[in-house]
Image (cartoon, rainbow, N blue to C red):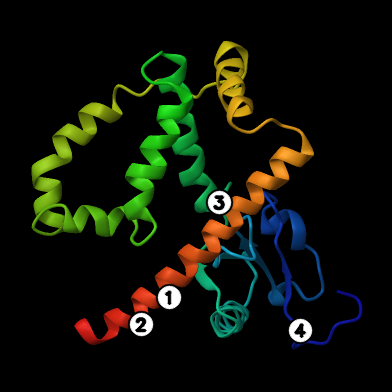
Amino acid sequence: DLIVNNDTILASSTSTLLPTKLFTGLKHVKQCIVAHPVNPPYYVPLVELVPHPETDPSTMEKTYDLMKNIGQSPVKLTREIDGFVLNRLQYALISETWRLIGDGVISPDDLDLVMSDGLGMRYAFMGPLETMHLNAEGMLNYCERYRKGIIHVLKTFGPVPDFAGETEKKINEAMVKKTPSDPEHLNARREWRDECLVRLAKLKKDIKLDDVSHF
């Protein structure tokens, strides 16, 4: 902040720190922005752009254009919020995951299968909103058909788990059975994950190129 000029954008990946915690009081606060990637950032292109209340709109636009130009998939948040967007969605999913396993509804291994061979299959190519739109005769028809059922199910959700105790032990046992939590096994599994992500990214790119002529 002390050495840059008035054209330099100052960005941070931030983890969970909000822009107001990072940038308030800086001389170049109008040039500050959070650019929050997804782990592993080398293979997952999403970047959440989160402004400080004093961030200049041009800073958002310049950062967005830069991310697009280097092959990332930037999204713009209009304001800061705890967890940003990806982690809020992820934590909602993790929370219900914990409750289902803790209540004995499903095993940890089968829960992960629900995601990897179920929701994750279509979410790799479209989000929940487009999924809703396509699963009926458009969004309005989906809401007309399913809003009562969705609300009914959501009202059965329990409180936020403490992510400790017997459920933590049960999930840990299942995870270490699949991948022991020593560096050698974890790194080998990460390498497998990253290779899968590379292939998926290539597939998505190829599909997008092919789909151009279909619309």
- The residue at which mark 3 appears reads as 81
Residue closer to the observer: 156 or 179: 179
Percent across and percent down for residue 191 are 65, 53
Query: Viewer-proximal residue, 176 or 74?
Result: 176
From mark 3 to mark 4, how far is it between C-alphas? 25 Å
Task: Decide which of tag 2 and tag 3 comes sooner along the chain.
Answer: 3
Would residue 130 appear left or right of 181 to someone viewing this image? Answer: left
The amino acid marked with disc number 3 is: Ile
Q: Position of residue 127 (x, y in %)?
A: 34, 57
Label at residue 8: 4
The type of residue carrying mark 1 is Lys
Above/below status of 85 relative to 117: below
- 31 and 123: which is toward the camera: 123
Residue of label 1: 205
| Residue at horizontal 25 percent and vertical 28 percent from the top | 153
Classify mark 4: helix, strand or loop: loop
Q: Mark 4 or mark 1: which is in front?
A: 1
Q: Residue at x 59, y 78 (%)?
A: 67
Query: Distance of mark 3 from mark 1, alpha carbons?
Result: 31 Å
**N-term-proximal mark, 4 vs 1:** 4
Residue underneath mark 2: 209
Select label 2 or label 4 by which is in front: 2
Identify which amino acid the numbered label 2 is placed on: Leu
Q: Is there a contact, CB below 8 Å, between mark 2 and mark 1?
A: yes
